């Protein structure tokens, strides 16, 4: 029997967390608030030094709670930060949704996950229901290409069954496949010259960049691969042929071979265009996180699926084009599924959380905690 959640408390927690300022690398108030809540539930909470290392003001929270029932240790993880503009959020209910006042994001990404995890665990604690040993990781700087979790010491985790609550899509859907992301940065060097008097003597770094970009396959490359130019920077007066242009780009794929081919093609386009023009280019490539594909028989997928079915939720396994902290947990050998949270239009000021989805998400957490007991 899965106990029913306290919908009013869940809503209050959600609203309260949304109204706490928590832009990436500025999670101090959120970390303090969550530490107090977790401690109140009986967790032992520690905070790492990711904040200091990243120039932020809070670290990742790691919390443990001994089990009161049988079963393997479960890991629940969400991120504390949100994208800009994410300060001074005024959450409000509008029809069937919780929304911001339109001047900020709502922060449901990832407050919905935080609130659902807290409600699920609170329920078991207050009713004295048996639950397995628990580990909770609330990360910082997730929205900065997972910089926070990258600093987290994975060695301390004992769980071999993890859940990251951090994806759009209806509650009940489970992300089992996510891409690797590679960041490509380039500095193109041309040659300055007077653009009116002696343009023949100049080599335009901007023109090289434009030529290279026009030859790249970008955006949706294939069903598993995407690529994008994020910025192109060159600043100068019109009477000088520009001798420097900086460019940053990314590519993602759930298929390592396709990703390697895409990155190689982008690099080649830059090198070819530079060579033809007689310039010089420095390219650096960095993998931000690795892809993963979960076995459908793995512990987190089976457990999340069984719990969703027990609630009558439609279950679907899907892939995503986005990374999450689950990429790191999986890379470190902790099978971790991403649970869809139901939030919509994230990373915009129109972000909204369907009230019903929030309730279902907390019920899902409770059902996962209950495991085979139901
Ligand atoms: Zn998120």
Image: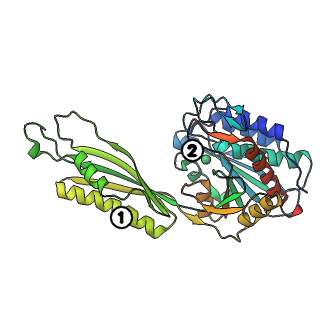
- Where's residue 28, x and y in %? 63, 35
- Where's residue 339, x and y in %? 69, 55
The span from disc 2 to disc 1 (Cα, nearest Å) is 29 Å
- Where's residue 257, x and y in %? 45, 70
* Foreground residue among 270 and 144: 270
The numbered dot on residue 343 is: none
The numbered dot on residue 264 is: 1
Determine crowd level at label 2: few under 14, some 14-19, many 20+ residues with C-alpha closer than 10 A. many
Q: What residue did someone put label 2 on?
A: 141
- Residue at image coords 62%, 43%: 59
Q: Is residue 4 left or right of residue 36?
A: right
- Residue at image coords 70%, 69%: 298
Dot 2 falls on a residue whose secondary structure is: loop
- The figure's colour scheme reads rainbow
Q: Is residue 364 left or right of residue 126?
A: left
Which image quadrant is residue 119 in? Answer: top right
């Amino acid at each position: 029997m899965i106990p029913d959640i306290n919908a009013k408390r869940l809503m209050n927690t959600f609203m309260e967390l949304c109204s706490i300022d928590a832009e990436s690398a500025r999670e101090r108030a959120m970390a303090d608030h969550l530490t107090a809540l977790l401690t109140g539930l009986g967790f032992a909470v520690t905070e790492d030094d990711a904040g200091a290392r990243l120039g932020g003001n809070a670290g990742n929270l790691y919390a443990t709670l001994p089990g009161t029932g049988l079963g393997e240790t479960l890991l629940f993880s969400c991120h504390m930060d949100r994208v800009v503009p994410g300060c001074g959020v005024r959450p409000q209910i509008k029809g069937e949704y919780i929304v911001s006042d339109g001047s900020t994001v709502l922060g449901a990404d990832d407050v919905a996950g935080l609130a659902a995890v807290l409600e699920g665990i609170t329920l078991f604690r207050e009713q004295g229901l048996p639950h397995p040993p628990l580990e909770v990781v609330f990360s910082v700087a997730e929205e900065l290409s997972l910089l926070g979790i990258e600093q987290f010491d994975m060695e301390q985790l004992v769980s071999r069954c993890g859940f990251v609550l951090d994806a759009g899509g209806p509650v009940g859907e489970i992300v089992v496949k996510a891409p690797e992301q590679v960041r490509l940065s380039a500095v193109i060097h041309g040659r300055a010259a007077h653009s009116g008097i002696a343009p023949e003597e100049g080599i335009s770094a901007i023109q090289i960049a434009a030529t290279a970009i026009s030859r790249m396959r970008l955006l949706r490359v294939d069903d598993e691969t995407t690529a994008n130019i994020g910025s192109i920077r060159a600043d100068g007066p019109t009477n000088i042929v520009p001798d420097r242009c900086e460019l940053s780009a990314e590519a993602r794929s759930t298929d390592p071979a396709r990703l390697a081919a895409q990155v190689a093609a982008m690099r080649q386009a830059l090198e070819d265009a530079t060579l033809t023009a007689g310039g010089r280019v420095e390219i650096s490539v960095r993998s931000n996180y690795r892809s993963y594909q979960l076995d459908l028989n793995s512990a987190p997928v089976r457990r999340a699926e069984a719990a969703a079915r027990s609630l009558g939720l439609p279950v679907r396994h899907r892939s995503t084009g986005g990374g999450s902290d689950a990429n790191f947990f999986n890379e470190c050998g902790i099978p971790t599924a991403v649970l869809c949270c139901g939030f919509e239009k994230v990373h915009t000021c129109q972000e909204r959380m369907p009230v019903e989805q929030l309730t279902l998400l907390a019920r899902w957490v409770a059902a996962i905690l209950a495991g085979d007991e139901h």
